[in-house]
Image: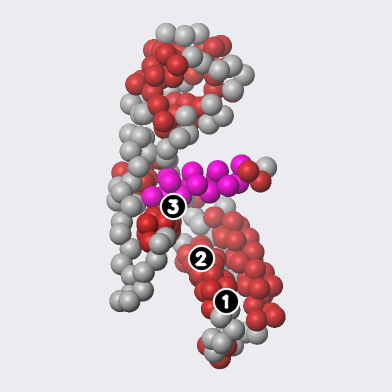
Amino acid sequence: MSDFPRMITLLRKEKGLSQKQAALELGVSQALLSHYEKGIRECGLDFAVKIADYYNVSCDYILGRTANKNGMDFEQPILPSPEGISSKYSAALAANKHLIINSIEVIFGILQQADCKGLNTEISSYLMVSVYKALRILYSANPKNPQAMFSVMPELYKGLSSALQIISETNAECLSHGKTVGNSVGLDTVMSPCLSPDIISKLWSENASALYDLIRKTEDKLKKLS
């Protein structure tokens, strides 16, 4: 239950509860709840069910098995294929498309809230470069495809696009902390987005489940690298 400590701590903080108050209402000592939240001790199945009911989420959610609090996975849309073209991976393509497009909707929703021109520019640049790099990988799979579509040589685009992406990420990080970058004014602390899973689910109800699933899938891959 490696995700359990993190999830129960997050849920408690989302509700604005002190550890002492949560422990009292759950019928355990504060010391024991602290051990659970720090991962020092593992709880039994009965307590896992009890704390899931207490926070009104599914057991799968607190165990990190799903990004949806109710434990239900989102429905995977059917991906329409161009006439005459079919793919045995259509379901997987549709699922990934759903995750990425809906997650980006949330990203731009947050940018709209932040109302920071420089931050919007840098995040947009970062995402655009990701799409550009993906397209060039696919385009170059067939050497017969006309390279005149691109003005940057194949030998240069990888390094240059990766450099641009790192610069955009660095600038966005600085701007998000209120620092001025070049002529771009940093994010006003008053406009700093207040976010949590509950807030995201409320503001972007149609896109939130896809975002949570994208987070889970990405972090599963990250954990394998650590």
Identify the disc placed on residue 191. 3
Mark pair 1, 2: CA separation: 22 Å
Front of the two marks 1 and 2: 1
Q: Quadrant of residue 196?
A: top left
The kind of secondary structure element at disc 1 is loop
Residue 6 image offset from top left, x and y in percent: 53, 30
Q: Is residue 57 above or below residue 102?
A: above
Q: Is residue 143 above or below residue 91?
A: below
- Of residues 212 and 30, the one nearer the viewer is 212
Front of the two marks 3 and 1: 1
Front of the two marks 3 and 2: 2
Asked whether residue 222 is drawn in magenta, I would say: yes
Identify the disc placed on residue 127. 2
Look at mark 1 in the image and give the residue it sits on: 141
Give the prevailing secondary structure in the magenta stretch: helix
Which residues lie in the magenta part?
Answer: 210-223
Kind of residue sitting beneath label 1: Ala
Q: At 42% from the left edge and 8% from the top edge, which residue is drawn?
A: 27
Task: Specify few, some or many for label 3: CA neighbours under 10 Å numbering under 14, 14-19, or 20 or more.
Answer: few
Residue 167 image offset from top left, x and y in percent: 64, 66
Q: At 54% from the left edge and 55% from the top edge, which residue is drawn?
A: 176
Kind of residue sitting beneath label 3: Met
**Quarter of the image that includes the C terminus:** top right
Task: Specify few, some or many for label 1: CA neighbours under 10 Å numbering under 14, 14-19, or 20 or more.
Answer: few
Q: Quadrant of residue 163?
A: bottom right
